[in-house]
Image (cartoon, grey):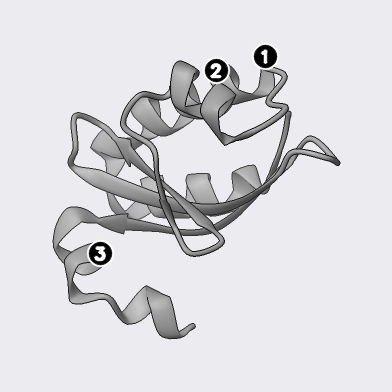
Amino acid sequence: MRVISNKILREFAALHPDAQAPLQHWRRALEKTFIPHFSALKAVFGSVDQVGEWCVFNVGGNKYRLIAFVDDARQCCYVKHVLTHRDYDLGRWKHD
């Protein structure tokens, strides 16, 4: 699975340095995995949830939320947002 884009992860980590290691761990784990469907994604990332067309990952011990669109046919994961848990709970990301 290809992650698009690591730049978003790095930009978030620049503002939240403790997110760097868990975000890069998430990216490397996903890049090593073939994901044919959501249940396979759930098997690798047990805390992932679907919210409409988006996949929401808990990252960094539930401190951060990563929102992405996973295209299993193309084996691409398009990162939309990385948010703190607090910012995620505000729900503004749903309207972007």
Q: Amino acid at mark 3?
A: Tyr
> SS class of the residue under badge 2?
helix
Q: Amino acid at mark 2?
A: Ala
Marks 2/1: CA distance? Answer: 5 Å
Q: Amino acid at mark 1?
A: Lys
Q: Is residue 93 left or right of residue 52?
A: left
> SS class of the residue under badge 3?
helix
x%, y% of residue 49?
Answer: 38, 44
Marks 3/2: CA distance? Answer: 23 Å
Residue 90 vs residue 5, the one in the foreground: 90
Residue 25 vs residue 44, the one in the foreground: 44
Q: Which mark is residue 29?
A: 2
For label 1, the residue is 32
Marks 3/1: CA distance? Answer: 27 Å
x%, y% of residue 83?
Answer: 32, 58
Of the image marks 3 and 1, the number of the one nearer the N terminus = 1
Of the image marks 3 and 2, the number of the one nearer the N terminus = 2
Q: Toward which corner of the image does residue 47 lie, by quadrant?
A: top left
Residue drawn at 43 percent across, 85 percent down: 95
For label 3, the residue is 88
x%, y% of residue 72?
Answer: 74, 38
> SS class of the residue under badge 1?
loop
Q: Residues within 10 Å of mark 3 (few under 14, many from 20)?
A: some
Residue 9 vs residue 1, the one in the foreground: 1
Marks 2 & 1, CB-CB < 8 Å contact: yes
Q: Toward which corner of the image does residue 58 lie, by quadrant?
A: top left
Q: Residues within 10 Å of mark 1 (few under 14, many from 20)?
A: few
x%, y% of residue 65?
Answer: 32, 49
Q: Toward which corner of the image does residue 92 lie, by quadrant?
A: bottom left
